[in-house]
Image (cartoon, rainbow, N blue to C red):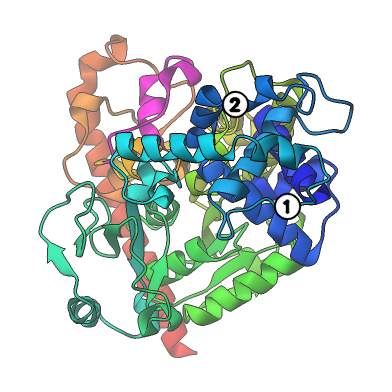
């Protein structure tokens, strides 16, 4: 009885506030631990999977009105809503392995639902036929459009090759397609169009990696496509010997392991994680992925000293701080309808998260030799995305040290969905500079931005018509927050400035190359 009430309370909290399924338990005042907590979490997740069909059943079999004495419209304080309670009961009756409500017959809600069992099952069959589903389990909505694809990232750190992976998949019965096809056909796979060298797309119901040597040995890593983008953007045009990298919030380690691979498992990658439990998860992931160049430390990134000798060689920082998680479709809280206005508690939570996220960026700005910072979230809320970026750009330290945004040319330019101009003060260049992902893109909801130092890039502006065709990092000029719009007075001498920028870029490249050569000579001499 309390088991169902706890799950229903968590569902109520999710509907009002959004957030993670796990976090909803504590927020709803549920103090379950151990096996009981896992059981409640499983019921919540499974109920969310079938929520659309369960609500459909309640329209044809209106239990809430037929049994209004047991399920009143208004419930007492700290009691779950009648709808959420009925939903969890219906799930267990219709979709659980035992297909029964695990409660005493003397508990009024159970007989109130059981009185309609025959009609409920008949209506469920009708829905199956209408939807063309052979099994009732196929009615589950696990992750929207994004779950139609499962992504597997090849990890070269494990010491194996792509050719070996291809041969292994052939033996598993998979055929590689030359082009992307959605939904991915059964028994097929293909290289992702945007990250073809490491990422492969499989049908949403694939599970070949379960117990497989490639997965267990770290050569194949399950990672959503959007989650791969921050590391890829961070390491754009990376040159071995440039310096060191830093992951400010590293657990569970997927992004960290990808950065490590992009560094060819060489040099040094600092990885911060302040949570003891998450740090253990990070260590396990790094060991599994064979990341030998990572120095993991259980510490809070914001407590680190940017001027410390330990970080004097850090040139790139990855920031993927805590967020609302509103973009993670396989978390299933996206199934909660949000037709009403956002609650005050939700707005307050977003404000707190945004404040923390901004603090992380401003702290990263202080590292003296850092020239590239990627800020990302698994959120779809502008409060955590464009608005945080705009606040960072308007900060005193950003203006003092010349921080701006890298243009689209250096931020996976082939990705079509970009930022929201209405959230960047109408500045389309700023909006074009960031990436947005949504479930209809066959990914989780995600946001990626890239800060770069003006001092390490040509200072002259380049309009969209004048963008260089060669994707050289040195030719990608940062977009300052107060960049002039196209078509102004400065556009008249654009050709002359373009030539000047190119010349400065060439000089800068030569200077850096010379510095790298000197650095290598010093290392050789030691």
Residue in the image at 29% along x and 65% along y = 198
Q: Is residue 8 magenta?
A: no
Mark 2, Cα crowd under 10 Å, few <14 / some 14-19 / many 20+, is some
**Residue 226 point in image, percent of width and height:** 40, 49
Q: Is residue 175 visible?
A: yes
Task: For mark 1, give the secondary structure.
Answer: helix
Q: Residue furthest bottom?
A: 526
Residue 80, compared with residue 368, is above or below; it is above
Camera-side residue of 33 and 322: 33
Q: CA distance from mark 1 to mark 2?
A: 20 Å
Crowdedness near tag 1: few (<14), some (14–19) or many (≥20) residues, C-alpha within 10 Å: some
> Is 440 rendered above or below residue 31?
above
In the picture, residue 231 is in which quadrant? bottom left
Residue 304 image offset from top left, x and y in percent: 73, 59
Can you tell which of label 1 and label 2 is closer to the viewer?
1
**Compared with residue 413, is residue 36 higher up or lower down, i.e. above or below?**
below
Q: Is residue 360 left or right of residue 427?
A: right
| Outermost residue, left side | 178
Per the rendered image, the range of residues in magenta is 415-436
- Residue 430 within the segment the image draws in magenta: yes
Image position, residue 72 (x, y; %) = 78, 22
Counting from the top left corner in percent of width and height, residue 358 is at 65, 37
Task: Name the residue beneath numbered marker 1.
Answer: 302
Instruction: Write down the residue under mark 2.
Output: 394
């Amino acid at each position: 009885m309390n088991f169902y009430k706890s799950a229903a309370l968590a569902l109520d909290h999710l509907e009002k506030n959004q957030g993670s399924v796990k976090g909803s338990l504590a927020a709803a005042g549920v103090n379950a631990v151990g096996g009981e907590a896992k059981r409640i979490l499983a019921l919540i997740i499974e109920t969310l999977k079938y929520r659309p069909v369960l609500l459909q059943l309640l329209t044809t079999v209106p239990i809430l009105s037929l049994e209004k004495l047991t399920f009143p419209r208004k419930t007492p304080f700290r009691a779950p809503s009648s709808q959420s309670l009925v939903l969890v009961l219906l799930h267990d009756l219709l979709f659980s392995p035992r297909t029964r409500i695990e409660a005493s017959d003397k508990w009024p809600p159970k007989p109130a639902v059981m009185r309609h069992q025959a009609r409920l099952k008949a209506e469920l069959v009708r829905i199956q036929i209408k939807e063309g589903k052979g099994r009732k389990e196929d009615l589950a909505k696990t992750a929207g459009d994004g779950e139609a694809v499962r992504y597997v990232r090849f990890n070269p750190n494990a010491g194996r090759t792509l050719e070996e992976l291809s041969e292994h998949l052939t033996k598993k019965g998979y055929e590689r397609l030359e082009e992307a096809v959605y939904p991915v056909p059964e028994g097929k796979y293909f290289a992702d169009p945007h990250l073809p060298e490491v990422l492969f797309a499989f049908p949403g119901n694939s599970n070949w990696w379960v117990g497989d040597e490639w997965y267990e040995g770290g050569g194949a890593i399950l990672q959503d496509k959007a989650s791969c983008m921050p590391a890829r953007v961070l390491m754009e045009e990376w040159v071995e010997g440039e310096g060191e990298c830093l992951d400010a919030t590293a657990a569970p380690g997927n992004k960290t392991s990808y950065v490590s691979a992009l560094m060819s498992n060489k040099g040094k990658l600092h990885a911060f994680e302040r949570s003891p439990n998450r740090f253990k998860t990070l260590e396990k992931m790094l060991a599994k992925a064979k990341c030998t160049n990572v120095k993991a430390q259980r510490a809070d990134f914001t407590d680190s000293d940017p001027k410390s000798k330990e970080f004097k060689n850090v040139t790139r920082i990855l920031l993927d701080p805590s967020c609302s998680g509103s973009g993670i479709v396989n978390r299933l809280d996206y199934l909660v309808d949000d037709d009403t206005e956002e609650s005050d508690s939700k707005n307050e939570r977003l404000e707190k998260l945004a404040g923390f996220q901004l603090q992380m960026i401003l702290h990263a700005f202080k590292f003296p030799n850092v020239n590239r910072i990627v800020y990302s979230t698994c959120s779809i809320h502008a409060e955590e995305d464009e608005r945080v970026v705009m606040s960072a750009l308007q900060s005193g330290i950003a203006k003092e040290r010349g921080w701006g945004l890298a243009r689209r040319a250096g931020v996976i330019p082939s990705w079509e969905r970009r930022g929201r101009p209405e959230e960047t003060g109408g500045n389309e260049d700023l909006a074009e500079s960031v990436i947005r992902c949504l479930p209809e893109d066959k990914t989780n909801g995600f946001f990626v931005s890239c800060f770069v130092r003006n001092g390490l890039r040509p200072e002259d502006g380049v309009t969209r018509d004048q963008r260089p065709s060669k994707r050289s990092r040195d030719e990608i000029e940062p977009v300052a927050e107060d960049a002039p719009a196209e078509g102004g007075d400065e556009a008249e001498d654009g050709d002359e400035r373009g030539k000047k920028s190119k010349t400065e870029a060439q000089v800068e490249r030569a200077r850096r190359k010379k510095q790298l050569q000197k650095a290598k000579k010093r290392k050789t001499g030691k």
